[in-house]
Image (tube, helix red, strand yellow):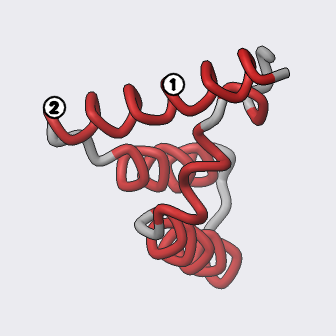
Amino acid sequence: MAVSVVAGVIYVIAWEASCAIAHADFAGAYARAMIAQQQAKGVSGAALERVRAEMEHFKVQYANPLYRWPMTSPRSSRWA
């Protein structure tokens, strides 16, 4: 169990470092992709504005390390 915790912490540190070094805007790119996906499905008007608002809220939340770190850990990954 301790090995998994240490590995998870190292993974989160590596993710944060790589994003900082690359100046990656993961939340922004994710939000744009989700909005584009909804537009491709034909969503428009109030429903699209709701998606945009949700994505803005996500970007604000993702900027908070206490929200981002647990989400980044390998345990929360769908591949884990």
Q: Secondary structure at mark 2?
A: helix
Please determine whether, in this image, residue 3 is positioned above or below residue 25: above
Three-letter residue code for mark 2: Ala
Q: Position of residue 68 (x, y in %)?
A: 54, 55
**Quarter placement of the N terminus:** top right
For this orientation, the residue located farthest to the front is 2
For this orientation, the residue located farthest to the bottom is 46
Marks 1/2: CA–CA distance: 16 Å
**Quarter placement of the C terminus:** top right
Q: Quadrant of residue 29?
A: top left
Q: Quadrant of residue 14?
A: top left
> Residue visible at 77% across and 29% down?
75
Q: Which numbered marker is on residue 11?
A: 1
Q: Secondary structure at mark 1?
A: helix
Q: Which numbered marker is on residue 22?
A: 2
Q: Position of residue 47 (x, y in %)?
A: 70, 75
> Residue visible at 62% across and 74% down?
54
Q: Position of residue 77 (x, y in %)?
A: 73, 28
Please determine whether, in this image, residue 6 is positioned above or below residue 33: above
Three-letter residue code for mark 1: Tyr
Q: Who is closer to the viewer here, 15 or 62? A: 15
1 and 2 marks in contact (CB < 8 Å): no
Is label 1 or label 2 in front?
1
Q: Who is closer to the viewer here, 16 or 47? A: 16
Sequence order check, earlier mark of 1 and 2: 1
Q: Quadrant of residue 6?
A: top right
Label 1 crowd (10 A; few <14 / some 14-19 / many >=20):
some
